[in-house]
Amino acid sequence: MQSNFDWPVAEVLVGFSLLCFDFAHCLQNLNFKKGQRKLCKSGIGGWSSCSNFSASQRRRSASSRVTCCAPSSSSGKPHGGFVMEKEINGGSTVVDVDVNPHPHPEDQGVTPWCISVSSGYTLLRDPHFNKGLAFTEKERDAHYLRGLLPPTVISQETQVKKMIQHVRQYQVPLHKYMAMMDLQHNAHGMPILISQERNERLFYKLLVDYVEELLPVVYTPTVGEACQKYGSIFMQPQGLYISLKEKGRILEVLRNWPEKNIQVIVVTDGERILGLGDLGCQQGMGIPVGKLSLYSALGGVHPRACLPITIDVGTNNEKLLNDELYIGLKQKRATGQEYAELLHEFMTAVKQNYGEKILVQFEDFANHNAFDLLEKYRSTHLVFNDDIQGTASVVLAGLVAALKLVGGNLIDHRFLFLGAGEAGTGIAEIIALETSKRSNVPLEEVRKHIWLVDSKGLIESSRKESLQQFKRPWAHEHEPVKELVDAVNKIKPTVLIGTSGQGRTFTKEVIEAMASHNEKPIILSLSNPTSQSECTAEEAYTWSKGRAIYASGSPFSPVEYDGKVFVPGQSNNAYVFPGFGLGLIMSGTIRVHDDLLLAASEALASQVTQEDYDKGLIYPPFRNIRKISAHIAANVAAKAYELGLATHLPQPKDLVKFAESSMYTPDYRIYRSKVVFSGHASCFQRCVFLAMDSVVKKMSRIYAARGEYNTLT
Ligand SMILES: NC(=O)c1ccc[n+]([C@@H]2O[C@H](COP(=O)([O-])OP(=O)(O)OC[C@H]3O[C@@H](n4cnc5c(N)ncnc54)[C@H](O)[C@@H]3O)[C@@H](O)[C@H]2O)c1
């Protein structure tokens, strides 16, 4: 706190002592176990014992009422949080405080540890707190919901079942996507049994429970189509837009976002969305929104700690520029100094507003900016580029697992890439790093086992001068080669990886050439969405006569070849980034080091079981993703502690358990029945509460004036 600030000293002192008293009172009801705070089931202290005023008296007297929420979820499992509710003048306020061992920072620190929403009609329209028909009879009474909902009460599990039926009724994937987004963001046309309004916890519960079925809906490949049509689907903006118009005022723009305690930002400038190119401003927003949904569903990062941002520096997409309904800046993309200055202001403002430990994930930037941004900010900020680093970590895990099927060590293999951009060179570099570590062969030597082909042919020494910086390490001595198939025949790779964003480039000839040089060729067609995949699963298995070990970026169905069923794996960065982010957050890591990516790879590869190998899989099934994420988070955090990059001390003993207990779970919380102040004791408590409330309000105003917090009432 700044010492030169004009504090309302008397009020703060009185309020603080009352708060201390009150807090001590609350603590009596908390169980302390192994250093972790857990709430007892009885709610919070004396507040839960008395009820004499009638509702009308309460409203007339403008008294405060506190309603506590049980720490347990509706399913009976602990969720690591509780909710208190206070009501003033008949409009009620929900106060949410998570007390898990790794709390969302919103719940830590100084007095404003609460956020507020109203009850009644407004509560139904608050996606964070709405439960739709799952509000119990007691909650309906306590929160003025009577009559606002049909009489039936159903469980969250029933809502989930109903909702999945609702999604399944659509044949077109984009319609399924819209049904899911309706639940998360818009809620038009929801079946009445589920929710009449947006319901964030139901959205995440559905996604967690049916992850294998719904991942292709909310992520690749459907998200690609959604991005192309994002402008026409969504009427409501879902993230923060920062354009050239806001230059000089970015800090101010960040402060307009309603959530103050952000842990992860996913930011894009929309220039290279999936393999679809420049989709401009609004169309690009689908990706950060989708990625952050996965941070919460798969990695357990609190949804309210996630912030999607699109930076609008114009677009070079002529179609958008000529579209009168395009909502972004109608100008060609800013480049050079103008671009760099805007991005620098953004990065500075982010750190100023959210501190050192905010994770900034660069997403779908074109490669001419992506590498520079990562290089420029990796030593001053906690930055991560999923396309470069996340993909690399996932692919390395798949390759390490594949060694069990094909034999040998990494150093015994030769790798050929089609596509030498962010994904291709990022993967190449991590393979080289890991191979060098495992074999003790110098990095320079190891790199010679790795070859890349870009749109101009094989990257080799005669092209060195004209190559972009990030391609140069791969320009080995070789004669020029134009065609991929010729490169395969000359280099005889054991592993072929597609990262070109160009569909159907692994032709029959290419796959047959791979099969002619290898007993079990490893073929990864990573480009997204499905239309851009270098080859389909069916093509890979058929043309290699069932010998390929195959995985793809976008999912493919199992393939039957020669009486045998082949299940293609999905080599997608969704395996790593949610757990990786959780590991950074829970350990308070301040910089991303390459060894953390290797740690994530190692953890992912270790999750592949013999049963998976028997099916030819090199990745574990996605249905276990929360468990996988916890292992990745634990391994990443362990490495961060080892490297001295973690700041949350002391290091927890069991990091896997710690990761699991740190994860956001979307089970509903129970809003405990109302409590009314009456009699001597409750009057005193009421005074305490009002004083506390007044201090919180006052302080929130102060924070707002300083631009640090606002809207607490
Ligand atoms: N599976 C995953 O998890 C994952 C992760 C990241 C990226 N990807 C996909 O990988 C693809 C590439 O992504 P990126 O970030 O590397 O893009 P990028 O633009 O940085 O790189 C594309 C590369 O492909 C090359 N290329 C283009 N056309 C080619 C052609 N006809 N023949 C040979 N090379 C060609 C370009 O020269 C460039 O080197 C995209 O489709 C993306 O969706 C998948």
Image (cartoon, grey):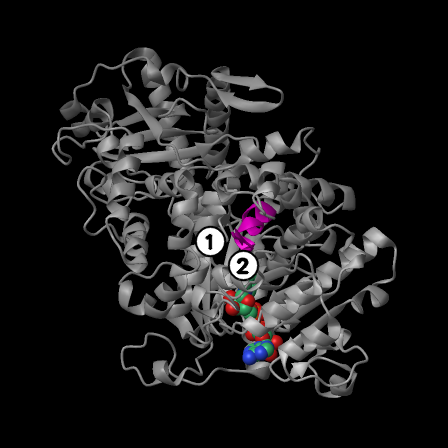
Left-right relation of 207 to 578: left
Q: Can residue 610 be seen in this view?
A: yes
Question: Which corner quadrant of the image does residue 328 belong to?
Answer: bottom left
Q: Residue at x 41, y 65 (%)?
A: 224
Question: Which corner quadrant of the image does residue 593 belong to?
Answer: bottom right
Vertical order, 702 against 290 (above or below): above
Left-right relation of 285 to 505: left
- Tell me if mark 2 has few (under 14), some (14-19) or many (20+) residues whose alpha carbon lies within 10 angstroms of its own: many
Pick the residue in front: 299 or 417.
Answer: 417
Answer yes or no: disc 1 within 8 Å of ligand 1: no
| Percent position of residue 160, x then y | 30, 37
Does dot 1 land on a helix, a strand or a loop? Answer: strand
Pick the residue in front: 245 or 407.
Answer: 407
Asked if the residue at tag 1 contacts the one at tag 2, i.e. Cβ–Cβ closer than 8 Å, the answer is: yes
Chain part drawn in magenta: 568-581
Q: In which quarter of the image is ligand 1?
A: bottom right
Does dot 2 land on a helix, a strand or a loop? Answer: helix
Count the labels in the image.
2
Badge 2 amino acid:
Tyr
Badge 1 amino acid:
Val
Vertical order, 491 against 101 (above or below): below
